[in-house]
Image (tube, helix red, strand yellow):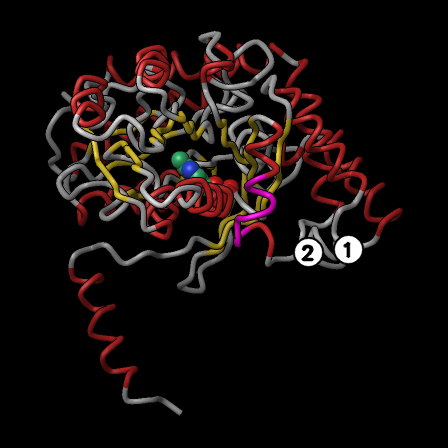
């Protein structure tokens, strides 16, 4: 039975549809061993067909790595399906203890704590940390992820927003408040929609000078940067200056779950006070087993990171040569700028229908209106001919739609 509220909700949904912002899920079945291929089932009843995925966050294909799959098979046979409770009640499996040791070691920190997701780890940790004193002040980059914004908001602490990656603006804002207050600076290292990288050394120095806690979301950097995949903090030798390093097991590590790494006391505090950690069931041992195998592999396989960067460079150069406008990314994230929601959706559909290329349009509110884009994420397993094929297809459809840029 439909309730009267359905009509109201439908109006809201129609708003999204008219603006080209309504989100369609693509029914994609990834094909293990053939990364980045997947079977796509069109929702209009047409026959399923194989596509190349160009927007996966499983950046290194670890979600299909034989070592990961093997570790998970073994774990499910040995330990069963679920965790059996919250961490406090009966969900602290030995594999979880090992996983947290591995993460602390990856980031050269005393301790680490695993959460159900990266989103939850940000929300829960920032909310708890900013509540540590009555008059905490949080300084947050304008482009921070929704999960950080939610945590800061839920803490009810006073919030100061500084312009994206603008250390001068941050310094300014810090100078305006009482020095004795607890100050938390919250940033990302690699920004997921722009692909740019924070001036981490500057932020570390500012944090030190102002006696502030530096909280760094390295979700899009862990596994990918630094000698062992410890992220930008490891690459730039700044691990010690980052008070908290937050990451996910769901992107380069290919599984799911989030975490923080920091000092023993800080992690113990979050463990003891963060609602989003305490009141929810632990991740199942099978996930911990897969994540552990994945991290151990990624840490020692430097060639995976090298191959990744090679493909990124090849794609960027090819797009540039084709005259396709990109945002100035410094990372593995390659945002192609379309600048209009309806056109962005149309381009994505044409690539899928005419070329079996899957890349999801990124629209408002994920990015500002007028900066709608396709966010390409090449992996070590995209071959040069896949890249050439993508660039040719993009060039053709770009022209057909009359978009600005490509010659
Ligand atoms: C994806 C993402 C998260 C959330 O991580 P999940 O593990 O997917 O919940 C947090 N921060 C940033 C910057 C992200 O892009």
Image quarter for ligand 1 equals: top left
Q: Which mark is residue 86?
A: 2
Quarter of the image for the C terminus: give it: top left
369 displayed left or right of 235: left
Q: CA distance from mark 1 to mark 2?
A: 6 Å
Q: Residue at x 31, y 25 (%)?
A: 392
Instruction: Report if residue 210 lies within the magenta region.
Output: no
The reply to whether residue 145 is visible in this rendering is yes
Label 2 sits on a secondary structure element that is loop
Query: Over which residues does the magenta segment extend?
Result: 269-276
Q: Contact, CB < 8 Å: mark 1 with mark 2?
A: yes
Vertical side of 112 occupied by 168: above or below: above
Percent position (x, y) of residue 230?
55, 18
**Residue 321 in the image: x percent, y percent?**
24, 13
Residue appearing at x 33%, y 89% in the figure: 3
Residue under circle 1?
90
Image quarter of residue 122? top left
Q: Nearer the viewer, residue 248 or 358?
A: 248
């Amino acid at each position: 039975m439909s309730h009267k509220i359905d009509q109201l909700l439908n109006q809201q949904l129609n708003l999204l549809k008219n603006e080209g912002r309504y989100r369609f899920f693509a029914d994609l079945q990834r094909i293990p061993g053939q990364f980045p291929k997947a079977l796509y089932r069109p929702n209009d009843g047409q026959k399923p067909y194989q596509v190349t995925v160009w927007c996966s966050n499983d950046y290194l294909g670890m979600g299909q790595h034989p070592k990961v799959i093997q570790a998970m098979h073994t774990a499910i046979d040995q330990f069963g399906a679920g965790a059996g409770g919250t961490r406090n009640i009966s969900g602290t499996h030995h594999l979880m203890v090992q996983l947290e040791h591995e993460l602390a070691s990856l980031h050269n920190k005393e301790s680490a704590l695993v959460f159900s997701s990266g989103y939850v780890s940000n929300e829960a940790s920032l909310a708890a940390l900013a509540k540590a004193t009555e008059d905490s002040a949080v300084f947050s980059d304008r482009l921070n992820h929704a999960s950080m914004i939610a945590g800061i908001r839920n803490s009810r602490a006073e919030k100061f927003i500084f312009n994206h990656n603008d250390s001068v603006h941050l310094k300014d804002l810090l100078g305006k408040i009482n020095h004795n207050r607890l100050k938390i600076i919250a940033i990302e290292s690699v920004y997921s929609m722009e692909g740019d990288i924070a001036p981490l050394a500057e932020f570390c120095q500012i944090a030190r000078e102002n006696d502030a806690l530096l909280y760094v979301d390295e979700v899009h950097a862990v596994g990918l940067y630094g000698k062992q995949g410890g992220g930008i903090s490891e690459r730039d030798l700044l691990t010690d200056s980052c008070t908290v390093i937050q990451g996910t097991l769901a992107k380069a590590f290919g599984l799911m779950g989030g975490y923080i790494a920091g000092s023993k006391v800080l992690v113990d505090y979050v463990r003891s006070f963060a609602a989003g950690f305490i009141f929810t069931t632990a991740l199942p041992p099978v996930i911990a087993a897969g994540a552990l195998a994945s991290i151990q592999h990624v840490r020692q396989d430097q060639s995976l990171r090298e191959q990744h960067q090679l493909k990124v460079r090849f794609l960027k150069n090819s797009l540039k040569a084709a005259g396709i406008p990109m945002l100035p990314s410094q990372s593995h994230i390659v945002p192609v700028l379309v600048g209009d929601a309806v056109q962005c959706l149309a381009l994505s559909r044409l690539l899928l229908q005419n070329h079996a290329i899957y890349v999801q349009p990124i629209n408002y509110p994920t990015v500002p209106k007028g900066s709608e884009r396709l966010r390409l994420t090449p992996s070590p397993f995209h071959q040069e001919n896949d890249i050439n094929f993508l660039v040719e297809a993009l060039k053709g459809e770009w022209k057909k739609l009359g978009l600005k840029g490509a010659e």
